Image (cartoon, helix red, strand yellow):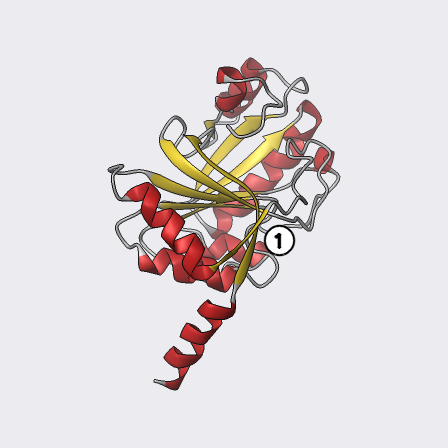
Amino acid sequence: YFQNIILRNRRFLMNFEICERFMSVSGEAPFAGDPVYIIRFSGCNLDCSYCDTPYREEINEILTFDELSSIIFSQIKDYPNLKILFTGGEPLLKKRASGIYELIKLYPDVVFIIETNGSQKIEFSADNAVFVCDIKTPSSLAGESFDENNINLLQRKDCIKFVAAGEDLPWILEKIKNIRNKNKNVRIYFSPQWGKINLQEIVDFILSNRLDASISIQIHKIIWQADKRGV
């Protein structure tokens, strides 16, 4: 009883720093092409060489828990099967993870996608929560930031993503072997670093190594300009 009171009070006190929010389609795995409402939280603990969100530290809005919940409700109430995508930056930073998890609990019939760099321990599971963990490769200059404990926590509905350059492929192969020793169910995707590897090279690598993995292309960079915001 008292724990529930504490949680409710935390909700009222919690503020979310927002970089941007907008309607679009999911750009990549595992729901590429599906309509989503994207909420980009401000701030990241990494500085990846290939980051396509250089404005990730911008705080353009500060919303309370109830305000963000109301925004989510306004988006889903007349749009059947619309998914909510939390991204960043890193959405699980700044003690906001608990608030994000509480939001997900409020809407059990809505699919929430949480894009994370995996450096923060995942401490939540729900049927309507899908984690997309981006394991940083050596070329990202943020390698070994992934919390390996998360591998055992990921389920079949979740996925691991590698944003690859050609030089990363041998490293990724060893990393996948390690992942499969611990978790045979989580889905694995390869996404190309633009201009650093061609799609055929990724496909050849997957097939020649008989990997249980898929290729994911960032379709929002094909539909719109690669550096366009708000898409």
> Which residue type carries mark 1?
Ser
203 or 94, which lies in front? 94
Q: Position of residue 38 (x, y in %)?
A: 46, 39
Q: Is residue 162 left or right of residue 195?
A: left
Q: Is residue 29 left or right of residue 168?
A: left
As drawn, 25 above or below 187: above
Q: Position of residue 211 (x, y in %)?
A: 48, 31
Q: Is residue 121 left or right of residue 51?
A: left
Q: Residue furthest bottom?
A: 2
**Can the viewer see residue 102 in this picture?**
yes
Residue count near mark 1 (Cα–Cα under 10 Å), binned few <14, some 14–19, many ≥20 = many
Residue drawn at x 46%, y 32% is: 213
Residue drawn at x 30%, y 43% is: 76
As drawn, 151 above or below 201: below
44 or 181, which lies in front? 44
**Can the viewer see residue 123 in this picture?**
no
Q: Position of residue 11 (x, y in %)?
A: 45, 68
**Residue that carries the numbered disc 1 in the rendered image:** 119
- Disc 1 is placed on an element classified as loop
Q: Residue 16's image quarter? A: bottom right
